[in-house]
Image (cartoon, rainbow, N blue to C red):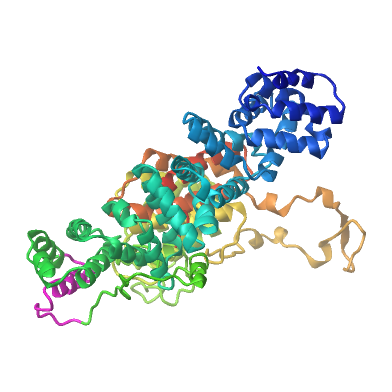
Amino acid sequence: MGNGLEEYKKLTTQLEVDELVTTLDTVFQEKDSLTNIDVILTVIKYVVSHHQVMPKSVILKLNWFFAHSLIGFSQLIKFGSDIDAKQSEQLIYIEYVTQFLKSSTTYLQNYLIECTENRTKELILKRTFTGSTVFNFVKGKLNPLEYIELLNNQLVFALDKLDSRSGDFHKYLGNYIASLCDFHNIFAPDVILSKTFLINQERLETLSLLMKKTSEYTSYKIGIKYLLPYLDKVCSDTNAQLVHHILGTLGIGKLILVQDIFRLNSFTLQKIIFAILDSKKIDSVMNFLLMKFHSIEYESDKNTCQLIVTILKNHLNDSGKIKVCHSDQFLNAITKRLSDQDKIIRERSMYIAKIASNHKIDYESDFTIDIGKSIAHDNYEVPESDWSLILNSDNSNVNTNSSDTNISTSTHALEALNLDDSDDEEDEEGDQLKYVFLKDLTAALENKSQRGLTNILKNTVKLVRQKKLFRSEVAYYAGAMIRNIVILNNDLDEKQFEELRVNALVSILVVVPEKIDELWKMLFTAELSLQQRLSLLLSVSMSARELRGYDDKQILKPQFDFPTSMLPWDRRQENNRIEEIDDNGSDNTSGGKVLWKSSKLTKNTEEINNRFREYASKFFYPLANGWLNGIDLGTFDKLFKTYYLSTLKTVYNCAYPVHGFEDMTTTMDTILQDAVNNNIPLELQ
């Protein structure tokens, strides 16, 4: 140990500021001080612990030291984390680390240089910064987005000095970018791509260089796992040529796998990717599409057919089309699809057959499959102004892969309803059917073929809400009513059927919320259609909101004077009414009795209206466990999970505040992460 390094022992004693600065200068001038564990721990324990009363000159010395010593900074985090969180001393270290992250601009560059000299330090770098060690230590001071912004500032500084660095530096920087995206796979790619790389041609070429220097797996992560989902959100016809240029520059055509293309929502982006693929990959994509074409996946069939038409029109010559047209795979698919009961499936099939045969099939129909403008394959000189199109894109070309199976829009937004009986079916004597007893209503639901279903559902809403004070009676019939309402089918195509089904279920759940168990039995054990499942989920959402105190206009809430106003002693006489006045004694009424009421004794309206708290667990955990146990609805899986997740989020939001909400939050975070990992949209389109 050099003589200068021995000076570190003075730091354990009380020193004047000038002497402290001199001692730090002497110690830090020794290169070994950056890796000597005794020096590092002494600085952490005796200098950093007093940083709050230190002058700026000392803080600058400390920042320089930790910005040049990855081992030193990692030890600082470990030392601070080992202090009991209940002790105020830990806060001292948290405050120092936070200011260090915000004020220092060179530490990432310096740490990457250390990695080039000692490869084992790359693991320390990843574990410390992108493995959540630092973030968990300062998370009370920084949220994830703020933390990512700070690390991105370091990245920008390192990029500005890139020309003078070795190839190993490029490799470690590329690895760091991938691990930073791993840290938060939603926020990090958005920040890094929109603010650092997709801003001009020079930065795009830098990203291309970094991807070439890293391993193929790391390049795949950056380009396919993180870049494509970002472009999937912003890609549109307006910036299509720019996106084509970006993907071509980064060599995405060589990295992408066939299945990656079908995880995207933007049809425009899928077309762009086709434009950068070689003929061999186009053939592989076509084979995959023909398998989907044959299996008739209703949810994604529209997108499948659009992609097939795109390849036939833009990427195959006449001989290529004939080869497809005469293949057994294509012919078997056409034969199967032409026997499908859905007209739109048959129309798409014949249109594609006509295109594949170069219009040699004589089939008269106005039906077409629109694929929009083709993507030019030429080299694209990007004007400087065009880069803003990536940031300011209004994505109007997102393909939600919705099916043409006429799933009612009521599963997303209920139409306005009323309980006017003018359109209801009449009975044999010409009078509109009315129900007075729940027993008769339940029997009508069980014998649903006799009368118009919308009439029965309207009467369910009326009668159940009218009997809201007779909960035991409603509870007795609730199970049978729920089961029969859920399995109803709108065979006669009655208007507003789904809206009324949802309203009927909500009216029952609002009166007897404990009967939610009956709904869960139907959801998880009964053989239901997709429409029945979606209506069931929507009724759960809307009933949770009403129980929580929200007034949704789409939900019918008829008001009745039954039973109390029928009793003479329950009618308030004008001369006996009680007027309420506030604490300041003002009274704008004359006559009557006055009741003084303190506002402190008045319950919060929100508390009065919140009936959901008691039942929050019954609503939330069966739904959550259903997701965690696994859901598989085949071709409708993604669509159903999107609505399922929306329902779960509604129930979760309505639950607050409730005992155990922290546990609900942990469960919800797990589910949201699983949804992101499986490309399930977090919001309804």
User: Is residue 200 depicted above or below 367 in this figure?
Assistant: above
Residue 653, position as x, y percentages in the image:
57, 50
* 418 or 34: nearer the viewer: 34
Report if residue 666 is visible in the image.
Answer: yes
Question: Which residue in the rendered view is the most extreme toward the front?
Answer: 3
Tally the numbered discs: 0
Q: Report if residue 359 lies within the magenta region.
A: yes
Report if residue 446 is visible in the image.
Answer: no
* 134 or 40: nearer the viewer: 40
Q: Report if residue 280 lies within the magenta region.
A: no
* 247 or 371: nearer the viewer: 247
In the visual, does 510 lie left or right of 429?
Answer: right
Q: Residue at x 36, y 44 (%)?
A: 524
Q: Using the rendered view, name the quadrant where residue 314 is placed.
A: bottom left
Residue 190, position as x, y percentages in the image:
51, 55
Q: Residue at x 44, y 70 (%)?
A: 382
In the visual, does 602 lie left or right of 72?
Answer: right
- Magenta residues span 340-365
Residue 224, position as x, y percentages in the image:
37, 51
Q: Residue at x 48, y 40 (%)?
A: 670
